[in-house]
Image (cartoon, grey):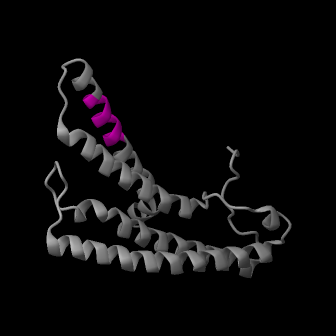
Amino acid sequence: MRRVLSALDENAERWAMLVFYTFCCIVIVQEVVRRFVFNFSSAWGEEAARYAFIYLGWIGAAYAVRERAHIRFDILLQRMGPRGKAVVFIVAELATIVFACIALYWSLHTIRQLLQFEGQTPVLRVNKAWFEAAVPIAFALIIFRSSQRIVGDWRDLRAGRAPYAGKAMFEE
């Protein structure tokens, strides 16, 4: 059980992104072939690919928080010692959690309204709440991943180590 949870912790977002990306590619290629070879296209393909892409983007944002891969200006961080970096990262993660909590609250408000008024997608005729749920799911993941980073940064601060800073933009 511990191995399964560890594998999920390491790869859950990556697996979900792979599924959504693969789905987008398959649907789009299928629609291109149908349109230009058979001179026929379905209405559902474009809408389904769009919603899968929305999930892909939001889950990718949570993964970027986990990996500290968001764009940031780190010229000052490069001049700081390990303790200073850890403190800055902890404060930044706390700010991220505050923002994510606010966004989670308001995104759940939107979901409640969609469920109450049964807002449907134009073509698929599915409640929009299923697709809008990408936002609260992503912000819940962001809160979870930021909390994990704070724990790791706190351990690094106490041990005097440099905190995990993620990869540089062009680093392999």
Residue ID at (17%, 60%):
120
Is residue 85 found left or right of 65 in the rendered image?
right
Asked whether 112 or 137 is in front, the reply is 112
Question: Taking 111 as reference, is 166 above or below it?
Answer: above
Q: Can residue 82 be seen by looking at this rendering? A: yes
Q: Is residue 32 above or below residue 120?
A: above
Question: Looking at the image, which residue is at 46% across and 63% down?
Answer: 9
The span shown in magenta is: 22-31
Residue at image location 24% in from the left, 76% down from the top: 112
Specify whether residue 16 is in view. Answer: no
- In this view, the residue in front, 13 or 61, is 61
Q: Give the vertical position of 52 relative to 144 (above or below).
A: above
How far across and down, in percent of the image, does residue 81 sit? 84, 72
Q: Is residue 123 above or below residue 31?
A: below
In which quadrant of the rendered view does residue 82 lie? bottom right
Query: Is 82 left or right of 144, judged from the image as shown?
Result: right
Q: Magenta segment: does it hold 17?
A: no
On the picture, is 40 further left or further right than 5?
A: left
